[in-house]
């Protein structure tokens, strides 16, 4: 994992260098690379060679504080006080410490947006690089020098020099990553070899014990195989039972999603699904069909006087009466409340009217005395048939619904048909009505 991360970092560095060479990128995208890298890499580098100069902890603490430079007055005073302290002991600093101390002061000037001062401080410290070991210069603490120079020249719009120092920074960054990779590989190799030797010793020590265990395992294996076969059979049977139960539950859920729980009839969703399919088939094959829409008259009064439980039984009784009238290919649905609908394939308006009239008469003739209801229960019916003006199943349902409402307005307990001219049939008009001299237009759908 660590090797992969290092290789990806190296690939990113090489890609960045190529983009810089092609030109046109803004060097400011590298502004936070130094800070992020110092968080990932420890200040104390591994395998420091004898010729690398020692950095005192106080200076390392100052470098760490300089990364946290803010606008806070207290922090600024503390950083400046530490800088003054090292300024006083400057003659006693070794070359590497003097170089790092210049970077600290330059970073402070960089945060104060003084690029010229940064360049001046770092240019004065640049000759010290020749007196510092290359392995030490390739550490993040030291190659921060090139990044600060690049940022400062970029602010002064001297992009050639900015590019030069950015390239140096990337080269050192890559060498540092390579060194880290080699060190990590060495550590992992040593750790692996140590673990391998320990495991080999443990295996040799337990070899005799394993031989005895193998003999016992062979005996146990036969017994376990019999037991496992028995368990597999039980699991297989259980799986089949569970699958069969899931299948039954799924079928029940499908049935519940398609039917009305109270009456067992097709529900509203399924009615419209089947109606759209029948409508498309009827238009493609040029055959007709009709729709009957009806509901129980004054059903609210029944619920109020006898209770909803009696009302539910009335709806169940009406559903049973309807199932006695329709054919097996007809669709009988409860739309909700006391409203029902019938789809009659291959039936004309006159035949559908006859079915509706037959159903109306059976409901009106049925005695509900067993439910404690002594008066007659009736229903109002609306009938509509497919014609050239109807493009969707919804339209036909709406026309039947409108005809049903017209039946209620005409006194309930009757069948009203909707003809092709969007008018109520004349033969169904009440003869004792003052409006019997003209047709009644159905409400707009």
Image (cartoon, rainbow, N blue to C red):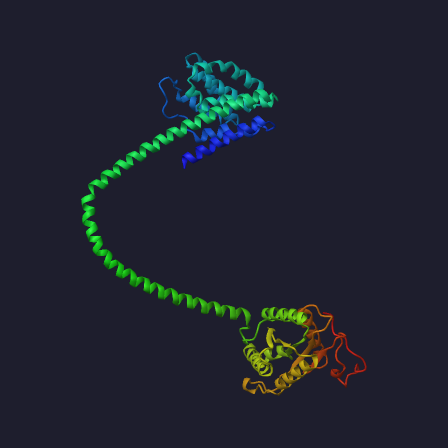
385 vs 218: above or below = below
213 is higher (above) or lower (below) than 45:
below
Q: Relative to residue 27, is residue 273 depicted above or below?
A: below
Left or right position of 207 against 104: left
Q: How many marks?
A: 0
x and y, in percent, of residue 120 in the image:
55, 15
Q: Residue 375 occupies which quadrant of the picture?
A: bottom right
Looking at the rendering, in which quadrant would you find the N terminus?
Answer: top left
Which residue does the image show at 69% across and 76% down from the upper left?
Answer: 384
Residue for point 39% across, 66% down: 240
Q: In this view, does 194 lie to the left or right of 387?
A: left
Identified at 68% across, 70% down, the residue is 283
Instruction: Using the rendered image of the protein, determine whether residue 31 is visible from the camera's viewpoint.
Output: no
Image point (43%, 14%), residue name: 131
Q: Nearer the viewer, residue 288 or 93?
A: 288
Tell me if residue 195 comes above or below residue 309 in the rendering: above
Position in image of residue 347 (x %, y %): 66, 79
Work out which quarter of the rendered image holds the C terminus and state it: bottom right
**Could you tell whether 21 is left or right of 179 in the image?**
right
Q: Position of residue 130 (x, y in %)?
A: 45, 14
């Amino acid at each position: 994992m660590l090797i992969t991360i290092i290789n990806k970092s190296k690939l990113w560095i090489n890609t960045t260098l190529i983009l810089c060479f092609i030109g046109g990128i803004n060097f400011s995208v590298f502004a936070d690379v130094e800070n992020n890298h110092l968080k990932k890499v420890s200040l104390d580098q591994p395998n420091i060679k004898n010729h690398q100069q020692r950095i005192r902890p106080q200076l390392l603490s100052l470098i760490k504080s300089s990364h946290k430079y803010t606008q806070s007055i207290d922090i600024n005073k503390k950083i400046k006080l530490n800088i003054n302290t090292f300024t006083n002991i400057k003659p006693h600093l070794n070359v590497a410490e003097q170089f790092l101390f210049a970077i600290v002061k330059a970073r402070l000037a960089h945060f104060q947006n003084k690029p010229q001062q940064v360049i001046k401080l770092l240019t004065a410290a640049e000759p010290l690089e020749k007196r510092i070991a290359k392995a030490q210069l390739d550490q993040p603490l030291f190659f921060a020098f090139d990044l600060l120079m690049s940022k400062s020249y970029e602010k002064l719009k001297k992009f050639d020099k900015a590019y030069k120092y950015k390239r140096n920074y990337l080269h050192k960054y890559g060498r540092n990553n390579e060194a880290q990779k080699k060190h990590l590989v060495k550590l992992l190799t040593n750790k692996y070899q140590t673990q391998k030797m320990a495991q080999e010793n443990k295996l040799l020590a337990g070899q005799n014990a394993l031989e005895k265990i193998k003999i016992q395992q062979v005996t146990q294996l036969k017994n376990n195989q019999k037991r496992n076969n028995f368990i597999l059979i039980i699991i297989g049977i259980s799986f089949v039972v569970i699958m069969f139960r899931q299948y039954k539950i799924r079928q029940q859920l499908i049935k519940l999603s398609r039917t009305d729980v109270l009456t067992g009839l097709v529900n509203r969703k399924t009615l419209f699904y089947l109606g759209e399919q029948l409508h498309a088939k009827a238009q493609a094959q040029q055959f007709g069909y009709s729709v009957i829409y009806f509901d129980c008259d004054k059903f609210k009064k029944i619920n109020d006087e006898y209770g909803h439980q009696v009302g539910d039984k009335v709806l169940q009784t009406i559903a049973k009466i309807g199932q006695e009238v329709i054919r097996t290919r007809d669709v009988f649905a409860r739309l909700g409340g006391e409203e029902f609908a019938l789809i009659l394939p291959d039936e004309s308006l006159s035949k559908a009217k006859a079915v509706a009239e037959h159903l109306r008469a059976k409901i009106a003739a049925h005695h509900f005395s067993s439910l404690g209801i002594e008066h007659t229960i009736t229903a109002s019916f609306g009938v509509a048939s497919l014609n050239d003006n109807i493009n969707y199943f919804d339209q036909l349902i709406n026309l039947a619904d409108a005809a049903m409402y017209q039946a209620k307005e005409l006194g309930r307990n009757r069948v009203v048909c909707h003809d092709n001219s969007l008018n109520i049939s004349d033969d169904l008009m009440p003869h004792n009505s003052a409006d019997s001299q003209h047709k009644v237009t159905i409400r707009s759908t």
